[in-house]
Image: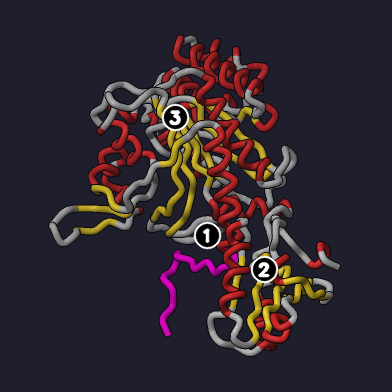
């Protein structure tokens, strides 16, 4: 008896049906906004991640040497891959480039709530637009995906920040600050104790007094952001505050502003983020970690050898998204559903197959016997797959030029002329003939 690998999960049909519903909802939202689906490889050169995040990233990857002697890794995220793809055909692609993709990713880390070594997410990205409307559209796609799942503004919030506000404030201190390290510390602010957080800021170059002052600045309310501009006294922070305001204004027009709150300690841990960033959280706090996040990464394409290309994206992940939906009571029951089971008794396969084909042609989920089982065994199976309607095609029924239509909920059934089923009805049920 083999056991599955730690951090990897099996999804049986009922579970997968619920996950497919969530994926279809998110993807359908992206398509309505004009995003086009792309397919991407599971393996990339390990160097691609090392160049962007340093050698230490290898410890978090499923990285190995393949038979050709190449250092490769299972992809831990999609953004570097789509950046590479944009660079490869940058001159031929119409701007803005709007892509989405749903697929698995892999990170070698300790499994915990909503976080596994293999995980699935949908990436939604816009390349080629620096306009705040692009950021707002990404926020709108994320918000509409969640409301499409049945969630409301009482269930989730987008905590919005700006990396250049953080970087500009750090630069304003009289200290040699490792900005990337300090921002990574900010990203951990809610996950660690205050002492450890201040230690990380000190390691990044701030004194403990400066760390405390910086921490206080992060609590500045939205109406007082001009105070940050005055503190820094730089065009960088002024421009960042203005850009953040413009994105939030555009989000209002796109219908997403009501879900956004200012949260300057939202930093996103990846170094390639450059502008507005955000994370989605459960408003009640019952799902303790970020549900998903996104933001702007204007320098990544150029870093991959392409022309300067602004970019912004979001990546809902289905492990945490399912936790949020379950907490809010909108996750569907993880049970199978079947529209029709066509039950055969005796030598009736041609007629049963014809009925099944015609029902499938109408877009219904239809099963019929493929194992030569008895009447009772077929009926039990139909019940196990939650068939709504059973169509009994028996030799005795056909002698009367009829079939029997049975409602599995009530147990009621009625004989119907065989030539009248399904007839011209789109979804014939017992009630149409009773």
Q: Residues within 10 Å of mark 2 (few under 14, many from 20)?
A: many
Q: Quadrant of the C terminus?
A: bottom right
Task: Tell me the magenta residue range.
Answer: 1-15
Q: Check disc 1 and report its element: helix, strand or loop.
A: loop
- Residue closest to the far left: 69
Q: According to the image, label 2 marks what residue? A: 340
Residue 273 in the image, given as x and y percentages of width and height: 42, 31
Q: Earlier in the sequence, mark 3 or mark 1?
A: 1
Disc tally is 3
Q: Quadrant of the N terminus?
A: bottom left
> At 38% across and 39% down in the image, what residue appears?
79
Residue 385 in the image, given as x and y percentages of width and height: 65, 73
Q: Earlier in the sequence, mark 2 or mark 1?
A: 1
> At 52% across and 39% down in the image, what residue appears?
293
What secondary structure is the stretch in magenta mostly built from?
loop
Q: From the viewer's perspective, is residue 134 above or below residue 144? A: above
Q: Check disc 2 and report its element: helix, strand or loop.
A: strand
């Amino acid at each position: 008896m083999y056991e599955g690998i730690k951090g990897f999960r099996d999804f049986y049909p009922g579970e997968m049906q619920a996950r497919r519903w969530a994926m279809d909802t998110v993807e359908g939202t992206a398509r309505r906004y004009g995003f086009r689906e792309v397919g991407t490889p599971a393996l990339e050169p390990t160097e691609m991640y090392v160049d962007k995040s340093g050698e230490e990233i290898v410890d978090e990857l499923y990285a190995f040497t393949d038979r050709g002697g190449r250092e490769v890794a299972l992809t831990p995220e999609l953004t570097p891959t789509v950046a590479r793809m944009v660079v490869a055909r940058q001159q031929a692609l119409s701007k803005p480039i709007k892509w989405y993709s749903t697929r698995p990713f892999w990170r070698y880390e300790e499994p915990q709530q909503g976080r596994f070594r293999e995980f699935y997410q949908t990436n939604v990205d816009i390349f080629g637009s620096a306009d705040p409307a692009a950021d707002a559209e990404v926020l709108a796609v994320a918000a509409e995906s969640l409301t499409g799942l049945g969630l409301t503004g009482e269930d989730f919030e987008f905590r919005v920040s700006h990396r250049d506000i953080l970087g500009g404030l750090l630069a304003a201190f009289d200290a040699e600050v490792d900005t990337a390290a300090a921002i990574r510390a900010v990203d951990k602010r809610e996950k660690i104790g205050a002492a450890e957080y201040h230690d990380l800021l000190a390691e990044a170059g701030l004194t403990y007094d400066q760390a405390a002052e910086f921490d206080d600045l992060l609590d500045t309310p939205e109406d007082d952001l001009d105070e940050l501009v005055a503190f820094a006294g730089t065009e960088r922070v002024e421009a960042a505050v203005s850009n953040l305001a413009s994105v939030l204004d555009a989000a209002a027009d796109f219908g997403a502003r009501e879900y956004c709150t200012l949260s300057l300690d939202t930093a996103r841990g990846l170094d390639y983020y450059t502008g507005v960033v955000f994370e989605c959280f459960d408003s009640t706090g019952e799902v303790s970690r970020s549900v998903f996040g996104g933001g702007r990464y204007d320098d990544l394409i150029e870093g991959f050898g392409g022309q300067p290309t602004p970019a912004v994206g979001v990546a809902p992940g289905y492990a945490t998204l399912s936790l949020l939906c379950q907490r809010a009571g909108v996750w569907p029951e993880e049970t199978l559903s079947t529209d029709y089971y066509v039950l055969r008794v005796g030598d009736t396969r041609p007629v049963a197959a014809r009925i099944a084909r015609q029902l499938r042609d109408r877009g219904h989920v239809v099963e019929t016997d493929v194992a030569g089982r008895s009447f009772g065994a077929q009926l039990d199976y139909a019940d196990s797959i939650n068939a709504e309607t059973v169509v009994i095609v028996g030799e005795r029924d056909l002698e009367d030029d009829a079939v029997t239509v049975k409602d599995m909920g009530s147990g009621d059934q009625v004989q119907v002329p065989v030539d009248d089923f399904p007839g011209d009805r789109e979804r014939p049920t017992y009630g149409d003939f009773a």
